[in-house]
Image (spheres, rainbow, N blue to C red):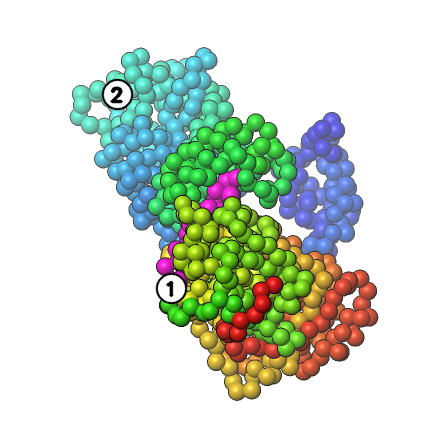
Amino acid sequence: MGLDSGARPVQLSLFFDILLCMARNVNREDFLAGQPPEMGQGDSDGAGYLQAARAELWRELRDQPLTMAYVPDGSYNYLSNSASAFLCSLTFPGAPRARVVHSQVEEPELLGGGSSVVSCLLEGPVQLGAGSVLQHCHLQGPVHIGTGCLVSGLDTAQCEALRGLELHDLVLQGHHVRLHGAPGRVFTLVGRLDSWERQGTGTYLNVSWSEFFRKTGVRDWDLWDPDTPPAERCLLSARLFPVLHPLRALGPQDLLWMLDPQEDGGKALRAWRACWRLSWEQLQPCLDRAAILASRRDLFFCQALRKAKRVLEARQDLSLRPLIWAAVREGCPGLLLATLDEVAAGAGDPGVAARALACVADVLGCMAEGRGGLRSGPAANPGWMRPFSYLECGDLAGGVQALAQERDKWLTRPALLVRAARHYEGAGQILIRQAVMSAQHFVSTEPVELPAPGQWVVAECPARVDFSGGWSDTPPLAYELGGAVLGLAVRVDGRRPIGARARRILEPELWLAVGPRQDKMAMKMVCWSLDDLQDYCQPHAPGALLKAAFICAGIVHVGSKLSLREQLLQTFGGGFELHAWSELPHGSGLGTSSILAGAALAALQRAAGRVVGTEALIHAVLHLEQVLTTGGGWQDQVGGLMPGIKVGRSRAQLPLKVDVEEITVPEGFVQQLNDHLLLVYTGKTRLARNLLQDVLRNWYARLPAVVQNAHSLVQHTEECAEAFRQGSLPLLGQCLTSYWEQKKLMAPGCEPLAVRRMMDVLAPHVHGQSLAGAGGGGFLYLLTKEPRQKEALEAVLAKTEGLGNYSVHLVQVDTQGLSLQLLGGETST
């Protein structure tokens, strides 16, 4: 029945044809025999064709269920030529505020209630009356548009003509036209109440033609030819609208004078008569629709770029991704990139600059159109090192300029675009790192007696389990949104699985060991020179974390002119041995790396004759992880270094400071919790960094779902803390279930199929469950309905196929946190 098949078109009614055939109490014969009232009685051929169309509708739609919903005060607006009806469709009578869509308005308080502004840029005092509409306008105040008006297609060049006027019930529009091949601008002015129909007496500017002629001096022969029949003399055919003046460009003033003719001796009337004028009927074929769409597109991006700049500089939680897609698809990403460069270079806040650079990365990724490889990947191409060096040195403007210069070399094909996007994200990481480095303000040490050479300082720590708020502690969320995480320090199978030990040695060297506590299997290395420490910022390099610990503890200065040997002898009279261990598997989700960094720093500082408080140590770990370039938040070290059950919080500000509140629970509840809390190692390892990159990308894009979920994480933490204070296991189970759903929203893909199968099997036996940390694998922690369920759940899991190499572990809340102990001297290994 489609036109492309060559079929004859047929007019069908939504109500009397399409919906009627699905209604009850309608039989096929009556439906086929009926005809709509608009069909003439003698159109037998049309009636037969309509009957065939209705038969097809009956066959296709009769068995479809039809339901009805009642909409109170609803209405149906039919298309018409009425300006009033058009205004009604775009405005909201009685609404307290204006509706602003795809527009930048400097003084929104001047917009009347129920008015509408669509794709406009309004600078300065632009006042809009109630029930009026502005479309596709760039206006500079002071401008006053009263009630009941539609104004479209005007720009700053026409603003002078509006000064001192207050329009009411008028439609003023600017049009692009092409007359005999030449482009031009034409303006039309009519009344809101004017009719475009040919029948009737007609009006213009909301008054009768006779009143209009009397008021303006215009005569009917100015508008219509003498031989035009009176019935054809209507607004549609009236030659009212100037399209060409012999001496100057046209403007709204060539029509606005008719609203209030001044005593100017007929000057305005003579100027109007001197113009070549056309009627709306004559003008419509001359409209240059391509130019109209192009000007609207240019205005849209003009206002959108200003809005983007304001959103970034004001740190608003609005997503720029729709603008990015639009700019790329319209083939004009250059202006957007230039605006983002401007914001980044002029930002006094590293958070604003980092978000602007992340938006540049999004633009480049969008330009690649899904080709060119994965967005996540390495970002250390030599060509980008010069811009990175500017950023590292704090020269933000120079760094942004150098980034843009390098970017221009990478725009030719998708693979280069994706790689450039990775490097822009790398540049953003530098700025995040500098913001987090502000945590150093809260790191302090106190001098104590230097241990004797060979005397071990041993630091031991529990692991941590996060019950709520994870991801909100991750920079930049931690200082842009403000974070809150509830965590537990826990022993696994009765042991504190993470630790480090350090001691002074006589040799001016650094001896490093990473591995099991009983160090027969430990990976050992010796640093004889500063060159051996240069890979401290490469997380996968052997001993990188321990090397970073020496640097962050201030024991070694890699930029010093003194050699490593000279530094160690001058300050300590010898070197150090540092051994760190974890009994947890890699990628466990229990905060191992951050807690291990805290243990190493604590042991190393004490071996160097200094003591650092736990809260200072939390901030020192933040600093170390930025030096190490692994990033990450503060919840792991808060959870593992501080004892028991607590909430860590950071405010939405820099410098980044973490405060910790211990949660008081009812007497005996800790033991009850120990009886009901279990860990299940899923056998799936994961690297949080892979998930972290996606989360940061979505946060910087300010995707609405991500922003809302991040706020919910913080709010949910306070609710979870209250559940602990009440000592309610069922409430805590609900918290865990909600928390896991929030984690999945924050980092899609963090739930492997095998883990989902395991959680489904365990669900009947638990109040709640969640993967630890970022998810993706590692440990699953459960709050069981019955106490001491380790053996019972092992039996349940044993009956389930396809779970892989899992194991179940006991958990106890650790009430000690970080412990530091000085031992006697031992033979070095």
Q: Residue at x 33, y 35 (%)?
A: 139
In the orientation shown, which residue stands out farthest toward the bottom?
667
Q: Amino acid at mark 1?
A: Ser
Compare marks 1 and 2 and give the one earlier in the sequence: 2
669 vs 182, nearest the viewer: 669
Could you tell whether 645 is left or right of 33 in the image?
Answer: left
523 vs 106, nearest the viewer: 523
Tell me: residue 596, above or below residue 237: below
Residue 546 pos. (x, y %): 53, 57
64 vs 558, nearest the viewer: 558
Between disc 1 and disc 2, the foreground one is 1
Q: Which residue is mark 2?
A: 269
Magenta run includes residue 199: no
Crowd band around label 1 with a 10 angstrom C-alpha radius: few (<14), some (14–19), many (20+): some
Prevailing secondary structure of the magenta residues:
helix
Residue 591 pos. (x, y %): 57, 64
SS type, badge 2? helix
The quadrant where residue 132 appears: top left
Cβ atoms at labels 1 and 2 below 8 Å apart: no
Residue 677 pos. (x, y %): 64, 76
Q: Which residue is mark 1?
A: 444
Residue 89 pos. (x, y %): 47, 44
Q: Which residues are magenta?
A: 423-445
Could you tell whether 404 is left or right of 498 in the image?
Answer: left
Magenta run includes residue 443: yes
Could you tell whether 42 is left or right of 448 in the image?
Answer: right
Q: CA distance from mark 1 to mark 2?
A: 83 Å
